[in-house]
Image (cartoon, grey):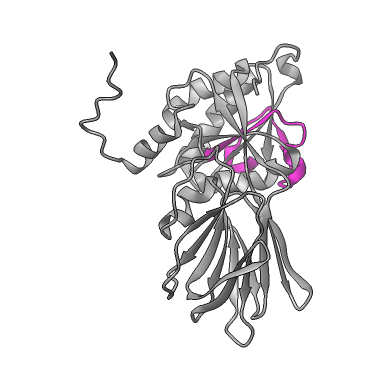
Amino acid sequence: MNHTTTKQTNADRTVLVTAHTGREAAVESARLVIDRLVGAGLTVRVLDVEAAEIGCGGVEVVPCDPGAAKDAEVMIVLGGDGSLLRSAELARPAGTPLLGVNLGHVGFLAEAEVDDLAAAVDSVVAGRYDVEERMTIDVLARQNGQIVADTWALNEASVEKRDRMLEAVVEIDGRPLSRWGCDGVICATPTGSTAYAFSAGGPVVWPEVEALLLVPNSAHALFARPMVVSPRSTLAVEILPDTPGGVMWCDGRRRFDLPSGTRVEVRRGSEPVRLARLHGVESSGAPFTDRLVAKFELPVQGWRGRVRP
């Protein structure tokens, strides 16, 4: 979807800016972004928990809750993937696109690098960006009929051991698949395939592929391969009764204790997370293959490309 602005004046446009305030580089970058946006006549919001550290005038300070992103055209996030995941909790309910500027190490979710910061802001001001939707998962956990967790994730929901090995039965579409003694079971999206699921041995799935991933983590079993299933499937992980309970992490941010006997169900999310993709910025819009090569520093020396007649 193209978002070139034609009808709105800049004064009618609002951008929410958030930064990893624990990093001085992120704070300095946030100030640059805000100055450039305000100078172009846009309304800029900052979160109340970050306003003092950023210290910019001429901005609208809003509470750090899902209402912060309401009616914002885009949310610019300065930090790493952790900052993007935190910001997604605010942006998803409002349907606001996220534009990440990477100040971390890998930064798969980020659209631009800090060296392209000025050009990225100029693209937002000019409306030169598209919006893509990333699939999420909805996660529901019950124990003896009581809801233990009702949440969602962009990357993954990971059911993990607490102290001793996790004993669990995994189910796909209402049918049991296998019982595993393991460190955990990861249910991930294609976006999450390069996150925790990757480090547990899962496959890399291109973000435009619609699928759910099921990845056992250090399972003591003959059949314990990562699996890619239909986006219409329902995955379930049941912690066996009379065994130690576990813990669930969603996107590495939200933690839930899972007593023994808990059943965790994972489905395609009811709402996507929207990401802004820029036009005309060197580090943005790169094919996913190029992102893999750049982020993992993969060796491609000797590649000659397609032979043309």
Q: In this view, does 261 lie above or below 289?
A: below
Residue at left 58%, top 48%? 211
Q: How many marks?
A: 0
Q: In which quarter of the image is residue 201?
A: bottom left
Q: In this view, does 72 lie to the left or right of 113?
A: right
Q: Position of residue 197 (x, y in %)?
A: 48, 56
Residue at the image position 35 percent from the left and 43 percent from the top: 296
Q: Quadrant of the C terminus?
A: top left
Asked if the magenta segment contains residue 67, the reply would be yes
Which of the two residues, 309 or 270, is positioned nearer the viewer here?
309
Residue 177, percent across and down?
57, 69
Residue 33 on image: x %, y %: 56, 27
Q: Nearer the viewer, residue 35 or 20?
A: 20
- Up/down of 54 relative to 194, above or below: above
Q: Is residue 36 left or right of residue 174?
A: left
| Residue 50 lies in quadrant | top right
Residue 186 in the image, given as x and y percentages of width and height: 53, 61
Range shown magenta = 50-78
Q: Can residue 21 be seen in this view?
A: no
